[in-house]
Amino acid sequence: MILKILTSFIVILPTLAAAENADLLRFDNGDQLHGEFQGFGEKNAILWKRNKPDDKAIEFNPADIRQIILKAGKPERALTTLSYIGLINGDRIPGTIQEIDDKRALIQTDVAGLLEIPRDKIAIIAPNPMGGRMLYHGPFDKTEWTQRTFNHSKGIPKDKDEAEIEKESPLWKFSGSAWYWKEGRMGTAITRDIGMTDRSVLQFDISWKNRLSMAVAFHADFKTPEKAAPVNEPIDHGQSGSMSNLPNIFGSSYILHLYSNHVMLYRAGFDEEGRSFMNRLQSKSSSLRLSNSGSAKVEIRCNRNSGEIMLFVDGEFVCDWKEKSEIQNNPEAPSNEYVGKGAGYGFMVQMDDSPLRVSDIIVADWNGIPDSARSLESDTSDIVLLTNGTDRFSGKITSVKDGKVNLTGRFGNFAFPMDEIAEIRFAKSQLKAVDESKKSDFKVKFHPHGSISGKIISGNLKNIRINNSAAGEINIDMKSASMLDFKSMESYLDDWNVEF
């Protein structure tokens, strides 16, 4: 029989010490429990053991569970490819296309072997998404991040008691696989020092309440000058969370300021006298259409070599900047170089009483493709985008076989090697409508990307068997799984812990 969750029981459990790579059970009411996922029992009860070898497995009702984070988000085996297949139900199955005809597709996966899926349930094929390596996906481990304030620009000491620290500075809270900012006052940034290459994509999900005002730093070096500004010309930093003060946290960098209705980009750093500067880059368009409370997927693409910076929100192009040409036309700019010299990035709320959540952070190499994924969608034609970022072809995909994609287009027939294709989007009119009655909240998510949804059939530590709406029964190898998601809510409010 599935045990009921007793409030008094759960209050005690979070105080137990957790192993470094323990699993984490997140309840619907915001409580958490470290231990080890054991699989599923009768009526799909979740079997769970605490961090004591002699303890018997406890049963929990899946209806009371939001997520299970497996091995602190660091699974036994990472996926061998970034390639994925996107289904009409929102699943992104990590794998490669082996063969396609007019009826079905064969997909080779690391997580479920060879799958056969009806052609009309496949919306996207992405053999080379973003064109490069996945450099980071998280957050799963809070120790990989550093919190910085204006008084602790090199990082708040991690060996100090958080209660003592918060008397001086509010802190971000780490929970499950997200960072939360729920303080009524601003002043602290959450940062990573490494990860970004010369040509990078920085992608992340945000949810916010009240109003959105957020600074995102990228290509940041977090360095402040040893030489202070002259005493007779003090730097006016303004309020602790003002934009003018951000170079003292992020160092030389680019700082994107996101509001609900517009966006601004600044170059930030220090001059030869040690004075900080924040210079705004101009763009032809800088408007956004976000609600006062909501959620969004943000993607920044930046190229240190060319000076090109692009912003996409929810898959739609917003605006771009050409840094080197801007500098040449701006006499106030400190130099003619791309000022972001570092490999770091970070986030900071810029408004009081503005709770924020940051999750699903991805850093990857960028192949220079300037298009939004949504710009490739068509009602009547299949669209093929090549990895060079500029060439595209429309028509009808007749087959995929022997590593080549065959397309019949308006100006002839083409055969493309799969390794030269970034993405294929199938004509929307040829896709089957999603059957809402068969949609499932349960998802298995993988590291570093991808997810498969379905109805639970059975499962243990090594394998979970589900019934997927497109592929039927699938046996999933858990070696690459990073999370079991039991409540894939669309509402940003439902997806927050109640304490936030």
Image (cartoon, grey):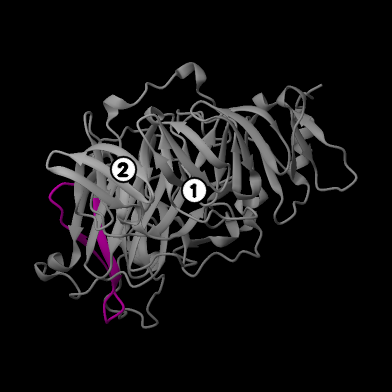
Residue toward you, 208 or 298: 298
Residue type at mark 1: give it: His
Specify whether residue 271 is painted magenta: yes
Looking at the image, which residue is at 53% across and 60% down? Answer: 145
Name the secondary structure under disc 2. strand
| Residue 264 shown left or right of residue 467 in the figure | left
Q: Magenta part of the protein: which range?
A: 264-288
Looking at the image, which residue is at 30% across and 26% down? Answer: 430
Q: CA distance from mark 2 to mark 1?
A: 18 Å
Is residue 253 visible from the viewing direction of this image? yes
Q: Disc number at residue 449?
A: 1
| Residue 492 shown left or right of residue 318 in the figure | right
Q: Which residue is mark 2?
A: 424
**Which mark's residue is nearer the viewer, 2 or 1?**
2
User: Where is residue 408 drawn, in percent x and y?
Assistant: 21, 39
Name the secondary structure under disc 1. loop
Q: Hey, which quadrant is residue 207 in on the image?
A: top left
User: Where is residue 414 drawn, in percent x and y?
Assistant: 22, 47
Mark 2 neighbour density, 10 Å: few (under 14) some (14–19) many (20 or more): many
User: Where is residue 257 drawn, in percent x and y?
Assistant: 30, 51
Is residue 353 visible from the viewing direction of this image? no
Residue toward you, 422 or 164: 422
